[in-house]
Amino acid sequence: MVLLKRDSWTLPGLIFIKTPFSNGGGFWYNCFARKLVSPRRCCVSAQRVGNTKDNVMGFLSDLFSSATPLERDLIANYTAFFESLGMSHATANRAAKGLLQEAKQMMGRHPELTTEPANFGDWLLEHETKDIKISDNLRKKREEGVRDENILWWWNQPPLSRCMIHVVDKRGLFAIFKRAIEEGKSTEMATKWVRKYDVCYGEPDMPDQTQTGEDAPLPYELKDRINIYRINRNKTDPDTFRNDCERSSSFNAIIRKEIKAGRI
């Protein structure tokens, strides 16, 4: 884990945010993509990286010798970011390749991603009035506060870049859960802790969701706006922000309240 002293830390297209815990301190757990000036930008996690065994890394080295231009850009961006956090180049590069491998595995589980047209966000908006399924899906997202520019921000990124974000979010949620367990919380309480201090993204109307109503998953299209909100709250009123998280049923409930109030 890499610990920093500031409440938020940024790189071009990247944001690192501090999350408050019950002891009044903080814990750096995740990094979020924001204002992606290029779809090749990506977000990374500083948690649980650099621990893969050398023989697996050797395999990854061979694998990435034939990487595509996008994959090489992602590796380069991740590597540079990890180095800026104090990692050696070798460790940072291994971590970046490991994250990319996870994202590629996710791509493999969702072959439909490979058939998306370029600038898929533009395509979705163009076909919104022509396809009832697209129209219905986007209508539900707009009910959550999603705007056209949010659809473009998320869906115009290459599928692999979006998969990288999914991988990082999963690691971030696990990092909060692990920290809560280490503080002595039960599995049930740790799960609630995760929901209080990080966003759960997904499709709000997916079946078999354990969280519903105000606590239900939020569309990924909102991620950029949520990141900006979190940074501003951490800078301007961190104590009140922490208290809001502790009192709320979930972080998602806070976000929905703030969207309705026009503050996100």
Image (cartoon, rainbow, N blue to C red):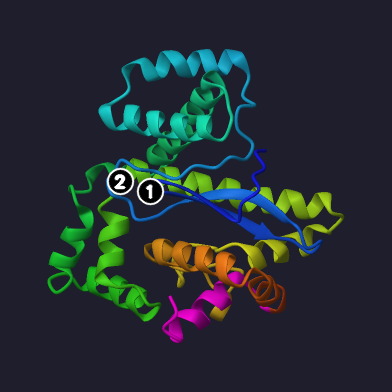
Q: Are marks 2 and 1 in contact (CB under 8 Å)?
A: no
Could you tell me which residue is drawn at 60 percent across and 56 percent down?
A: 7
Q: Residue furthest bottom?
A: 261
Along the line of sight, which residue is nearer the eye, 34 or 222? 34
If you read the primary sequence from the N terminus, does the residue marked by circle 2 or circle 1 appear first? 1
Residue 182 image offset from top left, x and y in percent: 82, 49
Circle 2 crowding by C-alpha within 10 Å: few under 14, some 14–19, many from 20: some
Q: Which residue is mark 2?
A: 113
Q: Residue 203, percent across and down?
A: 44, 66
What span is colored magenta in the figure? 248-264
Using the image, determine if residue 231 lies above or below residue 55: below
For the point 79% across and 57% down, the residue is: 187
Find out whether residue 243 is within the magenta segment: no
Q: Residue at x 31, y 65 (%)?
A: 150
Residue 28 visible somewhere in the drawing: yes
The tally of labels here is: 2
The quadrant of the rendering that contains the N terminus is top right
Task: Find disc 1 in the rendering and name its residue.
Answer: 13
Q: Residue at x 64, y 26 (%)?
A: 51
Q: Nearer the viewer, residue 22 or 217?
A: 22
Q: Say what amino acid the circle numbered 1 marks.
A: Gly
Q: CA distance from mark 2 to mark 1?
A: 23 Å
Question: Label 1: how many residues lie within 10 Å, few (<14), some (14-19) or many (20+)?
Answer: some
Side of 35 where 60 appears, left or right: right
| Quadrant housing residue 124 | bottom left
Q: Is residue 257 magenta?
A: yes
Q: Amino acid at mark 2?
A: Leu
Left or right, 217 with respect to 53, comes to left
What secondary structure is marked by label 2? helix
Residue 226 percent location from the top left of the image: 46, 66
Q: Where is 158 relative to 123, above or below? A: above
Q: Can the viewer see residue 249 in this picture?
A: no
